[in-house]
Amino acid sequence: MDLLLFGPPGAGKGTQAKLLVEALGVPQISTGDMMRAERSSGSELGQRFDAYMSKGALVPDAMVLELMEKRLRQDDASEGAIFDGYPRTVEQAEALHGLLGKLGRRIDRVVSIEVSLDVILDRVTGRRVCLDCGQTYHVRYSPPPESGVCAACGGSRIVQRKDDVEDVVRNRYEEYKAKTEPVLAYYQPRGVVVAVDGTGSLEEVSARIMAAIEGAAKGA
Ligand SMILES: [Zn+2]
């Protein structure tokens, strides 16, 4: 099964992707990670990436697609993949469609994790993080110990990250919406898009995603 997972920053997409990897037995494919790995491998393609990445320039779509094809032809991805951070544009979606078609595959499901801005603001702005061990807290749902000492590691540097503030969260959400909507609109007529309610616990959201995917597996 080839799957796209969308969700605004703060929707828990990363965690859900990990759970899906375990449940479906297919790899998560992150173009950013792959490009970085290819670049440090020093391969011919990696050197071509480097020419762009070292200047902070965008790597051309055709080169990303070349890497994607290489990845999708590897054994562990022969039964499908979970695409992360790609496609970001309609052009990339069309290119991916062409590539998957060549491999006799298609995107089976596009899961859009839907969470309102209010819920995300509540989640993210209330978040506190231990700088020493990465343990996360939430001022209301899992408050850090009053002593200020991290329950996980005993460190005393529990802080609000500078990006976890309202303006930043709001801007990232709007940016996500503006970028993602055209890509979702591209897949909509293909009947593969499912909107999943992203509120509630990790387990609840995961169960909803699995139910939406099983619909796809049965050809619904
Ligand atoms: Zn800690």
Image: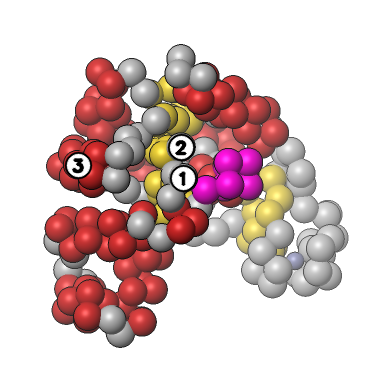
Identify the residue at the far bottom of this view. Answer: 42
Residue at horizontal 18 percent and vertical 76 percent from the top = 48
If you read the primary sequence from the N terminus, does the residue marked by circle 1 or circle 3 appear first?
A: 1
Q: CA distance from mark 2 to mark 3?
A: 16 Å
Q: Is residue 191 left or right of residue 157?
A: left
Q: Pointer 1: what residue? A: 79
Q: Quadrant of ligand 1?
A: bottom right
Q: Indicate yes or no: mark 2 CB to ligand 1 under 8 Å.
A: no
Asked if labels 2 and 1 touch by Cβ distance under 8 angstroms, the answer is yes
The answer to whether residue 165 shows anywhere in this view is no
Disc 2 marks a residue whose amino acid type is: Met
- Pointer 3 residue: 98
Please state which amino acid type lies under the numbered disc 3.
Answer: Gly
On screen, 205 above or below 47? above
Q: Residues within 10 Å of mark 1 (few under 14, many from 20)?
A: some
> Circle 2 — which element?
loop
Element at label 1: loop
Q: CA distance from mark 1 to mark 3?
A: 17 Å
The span picked out in magenta is 20-26
Comes first in the chain, label 1 or label 2: 2
